[in-house]
Each structure stands twice: as structure tokens, then as C-alpha cells.
Image (cartoon, rainbow, N blue to C red):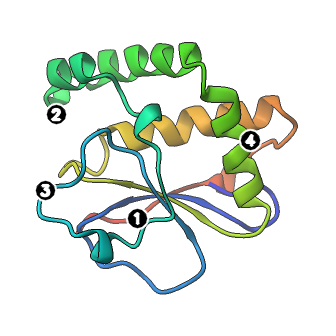
Amino acid sequence: MSDGAGHDIVVRRIYGPQPDGDGYRMLVDRLWPRGMSHDRARLDFWAKDMAPSADLRSWFSHRPERFERFADAYGEQLERNPQADAFVEQCADILCSRDLYLLYAAKDAERNNAVVLRDWLGQRLGRIGRSPSRAMVRQEPSR
């Protein structure tokens, strides 16, 4: 996902190989990834307050048949989150100068909270005049 200035929002599994570079690394899970040291994670920010609620995460339980309802419910949670506007502004500022990596721990690369957050963020960036282009969406392959 690119903000129009060539910087992307990239969804990537935290356990996979991490490229060197100047991208901003943001963990978007509420729980710390099992077996991942803080040194190895190399995070710039942990956005645990933007993650799905514990109840929603538990209900979803990474069951593919529940993803659509999970995505809708998580989107509603994001819209009601009192920190949403500040989060969008933070991401917009980051995207002015570098790529933003939304990191997650789930095994499913296509059905997880980071994918929902990326799509929601793209919509919100459009609302504040940072209209996302079609090239904005970039999904890293799961390894």
C-alpha cells in the first residue's frame, strides 16, 4: 500500500526473514509473539491498543470460515477506538518518509488482523487527504 510518495504499507509475518532497510516496524498484535525476543523483533512501535479485543480474537481463533465476520467486527472496533485518529496520523507521518511494516504472528497470511488493519488504514488515509493508490496494497509472501 503506497501513500502516493512511493512509501508502502506492507503486511508481514514477524517470524519470517526481515529485510534490512529503513522501514518502520510496527507489531499490530495484542500479545507478544511466542518465542520472539525483543532484539530479534527490532520493533519501532507496538500498537497493541489497535489490535482486536481479546474476546474477538478468541472467538475468531484463526478459523477461515469466521474471517469475514471477524473483519467486520474488528473494523467496527477500530472505528470506535478512541486512539484511532492519533494512530492514523502517526501512520501518515511515518509514510511521509518510509515504508510501514505491519507485523503479525498468525500463520495465515491472508486472514489475520494485520490485513484488516491495513485495509482500514488505507480507507482512513483516504479520508484525511492521503488518498491511497491502487499500488498501496502490498502483501509479503508468508515463509
Circle 3 sits on which residue?
Answer: 34
Quarter occupied by residue 80? top right
**Is the C-beta separation of discs 3 and 2 under 8 Å?**
no
Neighbourhood count class around disc 4 (C-alpha, 10 Å): few under 14, some 14–19, many 20 upward: some
C-alpha gap between disc 3 and disc 1: 21 Å
Identify residue for label 4: 89
Q: Which residue is mark 1?
A: 140
Depth check, front residue: 114 or 2: 114
Quarter the C terminus occupies: bottom left
- Taking 25 as reference, is 96 left or right? right
Q: Marks 3/4: CA distance? A: 30 Å
The image quarter in which residue 5 lies:
bottom right
Can residue 124 be seen by looking at this rendering? Answer: yes
Mark 3 or mark 4: which comes first in sequence? 3
Q: Position of residue 66 (x, y in %)?
A: 21, 20
**Few, some or many C-alpha atoms within 10 Å of disc 2 (few <14, some 14-19, many ≥20)?**
some
